[in-house]
Image: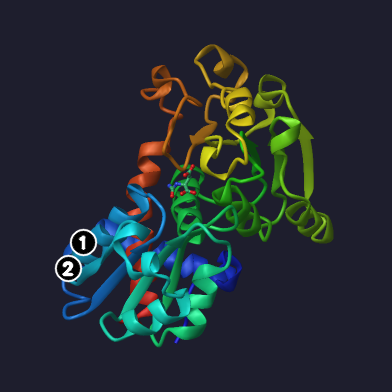
Amino acid sequence: MRSLIDILELSTTELDELISTAYDIIENPQKYAHKCEGKKLATLFFEPSTRTRLSFEAAMYELGGNVLGFSEAQSSSASKGESVADTAKVISCYADIIAMRHPKEGAPLVASMNASVPVINAGDGGHNHPTQTLADLLTIHREKGHFDNLTVGFCGDLKFGRTVHSLIAALSRYSGVKFVLISPTELKLPDYVKENLKNDGIEFTETGDLEKAMPGLDILYMTRVQRERFFNEEDYLRLKDSYILTPEKLNGAKADMSILHPLPRVNEISVAIDNDPRACYFKQVLNGKYMRMALILKLLEVQ
Ligand code: NCD
């Protein structure tokens, strides 16, 4: 039995297989409509979410399965002091697979060590978010057809943005990939992620200047400043509008650059860009559902 806590637990061959399954689901949804009949997914969300939780639920319904769960810590026994380990043991009696989001880094890992069913990390604090990475990878694949030799810019809150950490880890395994890390000094990529890049010999540069970086990028991954992870509101207010992507700022960009954002968007991308053919953030949402379907099938070992 396997869980998914960190994106690197999936080999590149397995990622390729998940992507192939997702393409097949897109082409032949009917073939998959009953694959998970009689199976239940539990969504244990100790932190707010719209996309990820509903994406998991939609994925399971489209596979013919059922869903149970909760969407906030207040409505679970965590509010009575139950440990994550105990919650995982209890839910294993009700569900065949668990998707867990938690504000504490490592909580889904603890759950996976105590559950008797597969656990999927649906975001743990400022750490990782492997299923958003699956959505991002399918989006890049559908736009570019490959991962090799891409120059990928990450812009915004690279410190607390867990989707950034997971996507960098995943892309680091493809050859010729380069990263441009665009952030205010206070929100730079954590040292442990940069150490991994250095150890793997991956080329990256850090800058505060989005417009200067723009012409070299094949992908621009915008992110929201993660208010809930700040220790004080003043710092958040000072940094929240560090980068706002407008049509003017795209002047120097490649004609086929793809703009990604894990959403929710606050102010980082002007709505005037939504109809630009380079904007991929709503496609990403749909791709996330297909990849979660592929992942559920894999972890439940459904043929
Ligand atoms: C992201 C997250 O939860 O980390 N959202 C998502 O799952 N699509 C990004 C964010 O909250 O900024």
The N terminus lies in quadrant:
bottom left
Q: Give the residue at mark 2.
A: 33
Where is residue 66? Give x, y as percent: 19, 71
Picture residue at 37% right of the left edge, 49% below the top: 49
User: Element at badge 1?
Assistant: helix
Q: Is mark 2 within 8 Å of ligand 1?
A: no
The C terminus lies in quadrant:
bottom left
Picture residue at 76% right of the left edge, 57% below the top: 192
Q: How many marks?
A: 2
Where is residue 9? Give x, y as percent: 58, 73
Q: For the residue marked with disc 2, what is the amino acid?
A: Ala
Up-down relation of residue 253 to residue 280 (above or below): above
- Pointer 2 local density, CA inside 10 Å: few below 14, some 14–19, many at least 20: some
Q: Give the residue at mark 1.
A: 29
Cα distance between the residues tagged 2 and 1: 6 Å
Picture residue at 44% right of the left edge, 70% below the top: 120
Q: Is residue 197 visible?
A: yes
| Closer to the camera in the image, 81 or 38 | 81
Name the image colouring: rainbow
Where is residue 210? Give x, y as percent: 67, 24
Q: For the residue marked with disc 1, what is the amino acid?
A: Pro
Q: Quick check: marks 2 and 1 in contact, CB under 8 Å?
A: yes
Q: Name the mark on residue 103.
A: none
Q: Is residue 84 rendered to the left or right of residue 54?
A: right
User: Element at badge 2?
Assistant: loop
